[in-house]
Amino acid sequence: MTITAIRGFNDILPGESALWRHIEDEAVKVFSACGFSEIRVPVADRTELFLRSIGETTDIVEKEMYTFTDRHGDSLTLRPEGTAPVVRAYVEHKLYTSPVTKLFYAGPMFRYERPQKGRYRQFYQIGAEVLGDESPRADAETIGMLVELFRRLDVSGITLHINSLGCAECRPGYKSRLKIFLQGVKERLCENCQRRMDANPLRALDCKSPKCIEATENAPRITEHLCQPCNVHFERVKHGLAGLNIAPNINPRMVRGLDYYSKTTFEITAEESLGSQNAIAAGGRYDGLVSDLGGPATPCFGFAIGMERLAIVIKDKGFQERPLAAFIALGAAAEKKGIELLKLWRGAGLRITEDFSEAPLKKRMKRVDQIGASFAVILGEDEIKEGVVSLKDLKTAEQEKVKWENVVQRVFKVK
Ligand code: ATP
Ligand code: MG
């Protein structure tokens, strides 16, 4: 019997992984150009970290965490998201001694959700966090950086949704109003929302159940209950976005699934390819989290991109991996010359593999076609004498002689 992968845990195979590499490379370029540095945090942390940061009455903590006890009896959790571990590391290593710290990360996250298109149990995120900046310009510019990444990746048809969740000053007042409203529609809410209505009324606005969406349609809007500083902050974020030519859609219902957010929250959706799992990135401000986790009061802003969903969107538009060539040496002299030529071509950026089989040429051509090469680069005794290779385009079956120094250029031309 063969052994298959765990449900909701995916292999990313060649072809797909080339697109992932491309996304990650572009993200690193864009983020580091904006002054972000990479942080690598472990895939597991103490369970308590996630309880205290994400919040005990969120879906993630209540139903989705991979929590287990290790052999020593400690409770560990596979990270369901990246912000909490990054903030834990920020506090632990006292990175706050710098006035502003800009970090990015990439890697797998784990949530026990129902697997479906765009939703998996192990999924990858690329995220960025600005720690120590209270300016609304940090919110706008960080969203702008993300939009710039999507532009460079040719992702079109996206919508930015933003909201403000207020702060420790104004949110409690809003929460009590919302609670009173929810009391009035209690019977129409799903069981889960009824249960956590008192402890965490905001969750009812994030609930995906159609019942709850309908029942909360006329719920009081947080944007109408913000205190003056939160209002000003929100206006400045919108102003900053306008300055970047980004037109957001204001969505006062968008409260996000994690409790640590304050002030700005946002989501970017790509409707076309994804259906209901359409959010490709999300984030917001979390001014209270660093101090909640034992550090000094530090205003922060961050986001995470969902890799699988972004890859679906980009693949739908057609992504071409760099072409692969295959070298076929005919005879010992060609094999020897090949050592030098392959070094030259690879150094110049060509992807070229070598066929080692001793079968007749026709068979070897078939083999390299089957491994996915776009070109066969053939070197025999005649070619050595002339300083050329016979280059066959395996798609069109056209063959021509190309000088050694022109091989790379010729292959790239067809891309
Ligand atoms: P969703 O709207 O799918 O419930 P979320 O609000 O739980 O997402 P966040 O925790 O903010 O998402 O994570 C940011 C991004 O990570 C999401 O916008 C999405 O692209 C991606 N993501 C979240 N959960 C999953 C998952 N189970 N599988 C694949 N991608 C996911
Ligand atoms: Mg979710």
Image (cartoon, helix red, strand yellow):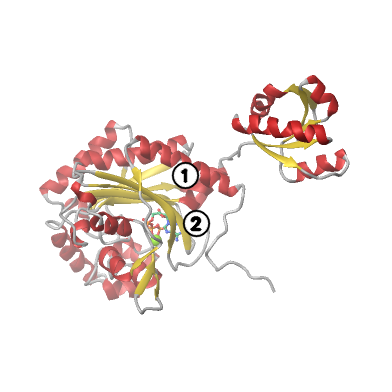
| Type of amino acid under label 2 | Gly
Depth-wise, is mark 1 or mark 2 nearer the camera? 1
Foreground residue among 56 and 75: 75
Residue at coordinates 41% horizontally, 48% vertically from top-left? 269
Q: Which residue is mark 2?
A: 118
User: Could you tell me which quadrant the N terminus lies in?
Assistant: bottom right
Q: Is residue 112 above or below residue 271?
A: below
Helix, strand or loop at mark 1: helix
Q: Quadrant of residue 362?
A: top right
Report whether the residue tagged 2 is closer than 8 Å to ligand 1.
yes
Name the mark on residue 24. Answer: 1
Expressed as whole percent of the image width and height from the top left, the position of residue 409 reads 65, 24
Q: Secondary structure at mark 2?
A: loop
Q: Does the image show residue 415?
A: no
Q: Is residue 356 left or right of residue 177?
A: right
Q: Residues within 10 Å of mark 2 (few under 14, many from 20)?
A: many
- 413 over 122 or under it: above or below: above
